[in-house]
Amino acid sequence: MWSFLTSFIPRALMQAMPLLYGSTGEILTEKSGNLNLGIPGIMFIGAITGVSGAFIYEHSVPAGQMIGILAVLIPLMSCLIGSFLMGLLYCFLTVTLRANQNVTGLSLTIFGTGVAQFLGGSLIKLTHAQEAGVASMTITETVKYYSNGNVPGWLAYSAVAIAILAALFLKYTRTGMQLRAVGENPATADAAGINVTRYKYLATIVGSMIAGLGGLCFVMECAHGTWSEPRIDQIGWLAIALVIFTTWRPAISIPASIMFGGLLILSEHLNPPIGIKELYTLIPYVVTLVVLIIVSLRKKRENLPPQSLGLAYFREER
């Protein structure tokens, strides 16, 4: 039992951090009234741009001569830039052009997944790498600066810090309250002198950059620097489900992400029979559905999504 816990808990914590990044980023986005279903695609882009930056740097310097700070900053900045562009594209389409948010988000997911798989496959071909008969690409040197084996690294601690800061920002700061006002009733916020477009852009772009870090965290810590089309799409959809599960509270996302992370890898540690193992992957989604039903029945205002969530704002109708 003790050996099970000592191996299971660290892995559950590591698996939870990408979920926490994704859910925190999406909560900030949805608090502005934008429903971004492109989170899986954004996490894919964050992962592949970070991996590409690490790959280019690692293969451009002689072995053993990498500079630690550059090994950290280059993938990190590459990830943030890629996620920033995805968030900017979403905002341009939904806020400026007022395109349908559901369609735009799903399109970004398809686009991000396709781009990541194409670039990842290209990097694999460049290195001619094969691992256990499966094509893969490993950035063995860079990952040392992000993760320490099965122990959560600094990206994991950063995820918790960002979630706490987001909770404090939304609840106690004037800017956070104005952001919530934009998500609840943009017309009223606009009449009060709040720049609705600016808040939607900033919240969505910052939320996308945070979610993109989740993709980088998954590759660097959970996959130990290996790119072989990881399960980032599953992590992305679960992150969106976590937003509902936590009733749009970043602080609650911390324990909820750990629970979901444990459920994701539970089958790997229990080794259930074939056929039953696949059912374990449904548990997080079933739990989310149950919570959604309970929240809907209680009908408390603080547990409901922002009133304008998913709706385009037309100032001319104010």
Image (cartoon, rainbow, N blue to C red):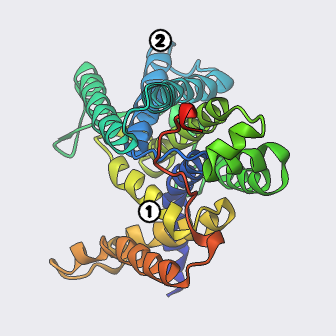
Give the image location of residue 273, x and y in percent: 19, 82
Give the image location of residue 221, x and y in percent: 51, 48
Which secondary structure, mark 2? loop
Decide which of tag 1 and tag 2 comes sooner along the chain.
2
Mark 1 sits on what residue? 241
Quadrant the C terminus occupies: top right
Mark 1: few/some/many CA within 10 Å (<14, 14-19, 20+): some
Mark 2: few/some/many CA within 10 Å (<14, 14-19, 20+): few
Marks 1 and 2: which is nearer the front? Answer: 1
Nearest the camera: 315 or 71? Answer: 315
Q: Residue visible at 75% across and 45% down? A: 178
Give the quarter of the image for residue 209: top right
Give the image location of residue 91, x and y in percent: 50, 30
Q: Residue visible at 68% across and 54% down? A: 163
Nearest the camera: 233 or 32? Answer: 32
Give the image location of residue 24, x and y in percent: 59, 52
Q: Amino acid at mark 2?
A: Ser
Image marks 1 and 2: residues in contact by CB distance under 8 Å = no
Judge from the rendering whether residue 164 lies leftward or rightward of residue 292; answer left or right. right
Nearest the camera: 97 or 134? Answer: 97
Q: CA distance from mark 1 to mark 2?
A: 40 Å
Residue 60 numbered tag: 2
Give the quarter of the image for residue 280: bottom left
Judge from the rendering whether residue 48 lies leftward or rightward of residue 273; answer left or right. right
Q: Amino acid at mark 1?
A: Ala
